[in-house]
Image: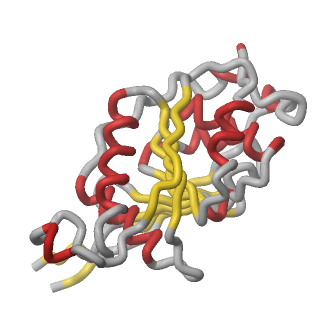
Amino acid sequence: MTASRTPSRTPFTATAVGSDRARSPLIRGAEATAYGPLPPPAPHTGAEVAALVGLLVAQRPRIRTVVLGHSRDAASRAAAEAFAEAWGEPEGRAGRGDPEDREGSDGGAVLAVVDWPEQAASWLRAARRLTAPAPDAWVIAAAPLGWAQLARRLAQSTDWAPVRTFGFASLSEPRAVALAGPDVLDGVRGAAADGGTWTIRGGWLTTDPAGPVLRR
């Protein structure tokens, strides 16, 4: 038997229409359509939620508190709810066993849940609500265009840290990363629908598939 588990890398570059990024987080007109229509978030999977929780549990110093952010589409809302449920359960036992057996075990805490529309006047309100609780990490489930604009505002106006931000698969859309602009999302990582992981770093989106796939 042979095992196949090959990471892949995808470059992303911003076009010239993004040159006004430093003045405003808003993405308008030609900039918004430069990469064509962006895909809506897909429904989350159990493997995706488990991989996302696993990423946070593996971090050192340990992550105990998160702020959970999501856009207002049904898929992102459901993904955020699934993560909140899994994160509050004991480490390594999410979704299994009798709740009484887990009493007193060490689950994580969600300090706040923040949502946002796809279009906003400045994104400042959502950015402040996300960062005000000063969590150990942020977990995001969002549609690409709104997230790109909110990330710009977070980078410009708050002490948000992309390296402490974890997301569902929708955040790994390369065109949204390009719209956000150079370095805005550098360090963000997250889970894929198949249970694999991805990382944004130095102008590249690196994906690592789940498991080894065994072949006879």
Query: Is residue 10 shown above or below 163?
Result: above
Image colouring? secondary structure
Can you give x and y, in whole percent of width and height, for residue 149 in the image? 68, 32
Residue 23 can be seen, yes or no = yes
In the rendered picture of this protein, how many numbered marks are placed on residues? 0
User: Is residue 78 found left or right of 179 in the rendered image?
Assistant: left
Quadrant where the C terminus sits is bottom left
User: Is residue 67 found left or right of 45 in the rendered image?
Assistant: right
**Which residue occupies the foreground of this view, 138 or 148?**
138
- Where, by quadrant of the figure, is residue 51 drawn? bottom left
Residue shown at the point (75%, 37%) measured from the top left:
153
Can you give x and y, in whole percent of width and height, for residue 61 in the image? 59, 81
Can you give x and y, in whole percent of width and height, for residue 37 in the image? 51, 22
**Which residue occupies the foreground of this view, 33 or 53?**
53
Q: Residue furthest top?
A: 29
Residue shown at the point (41%, 58%) measured from the top left:
191
Residue shown at the point (21%, 83%) measured from the top left:
2
Can you give x and y, in whole percent of width and height, for residue 39 in the image? 44, 30
Quadrant where the N terminus sits is bottom left
Residue shown at the point (25%, 50%) measured from the top left:
45
User: Is residue 168 found left or right of 131 in the rendered image?
Assistant: left
